[in-house]
Image (cartoon, helix red, strand yellow):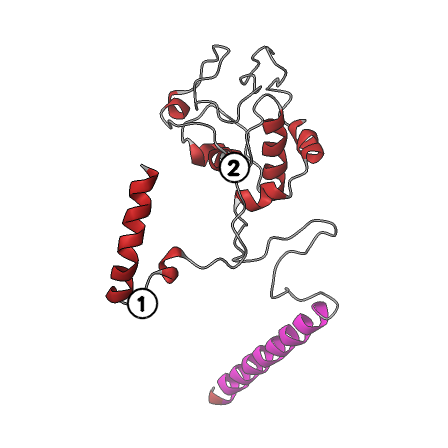
Amino acid sequence: MDDRFNTIAGWALFAGIVGLGLTTVSSHYFSADKPHRPEKMGYAIEGVEQEAEGGAEAPIATLLASADVAKGQATFAKCASCHTISQGGANGIGPNLHGVVGEAIGKGVGGFAFSDALKSVGGNWDFEKLNDWLKSPKAFAPGTKMTFAGLPKGEDRANLIAYLNTQGSNLPLPAAPAAGAAPAADAAPADAEAKDDKAAPAEASEAAAQ
């Protein structure tokens, strides 16, 4: 009886070892010609610019200094399905944009029904606000009726703003910050004595200006 049990147990153990070996061999065989999962998923598409990780975007004043009005007009084609820009043009899905640069936000001149979200922003459409709006309308004015997702590239926004500015606004472009300009705090006098020395001339100049 014991011999029979030992025989059965031995064959069972042998079958298990054979099965494990076959599983290992087959897994290596069937995966031999398959590509391995890459460490970094996805791939770059040729011709599409990649934004540098952690790269800071240049100020809109800097981008406007080299903006291309013709390219901005071409970009406006994306807006033309909702907006007109000619003087006296009718409102469409969106308001007429003639003279929009410098205009009060959420007011308009053609009686367009702006959302409360946009009217609550206040102020005027200066270059900075237009840049923020065109980058992401929903982030600029949460709850806005504007469905446009925005322009992610600063150069595209600068080109479009430059074009809009030529259509009835013609405001002077903001001065681009000087490259490598030191913060104003760095120019402060090193000690209190230097401040005192400069105080009297400064006060005299201020009095003269008045």
What's the residue at 38%, 21% (across, down)?
116
Task: Please tell me which residue lies in front, 64 or 115.
Answer: 64
Disc 2 marks which residue? 131
Residue at the extreme bottom: 3
As displayed, is residue 147 above or below residue 114? below
Instruction: Give the amino acid type for the residue marked by disc 2 in the picture.
Output: Asn
| Distance (Cα) linking label 2 and label 1 | 38 Å
- Which corner quadrant holds the C terminus? top left
How many numbered marks are there? 2
First reached walking from the N terminus: tag 2 or tag 1:
2
Q: Position of residue 93 (x, y in %)?
A: 55, 16
Q: At label 1, which amino acid type do we have?
A: Ala
The magenta segment: 3-31
Left or right of residue 194, residue 127 in this image: right
Q: Which mark is residue 190?
A: 1
- Based on the picture, tell me whether residue 51 belongs to the magenta stretch: no
Residue drawn at the location 71% of the way across and 33% of the way down: 70
Question: Where residue 90 sits: x, y (%)?
Answer: 59, 10
Q: Quadrant of residue 113?
A: top left
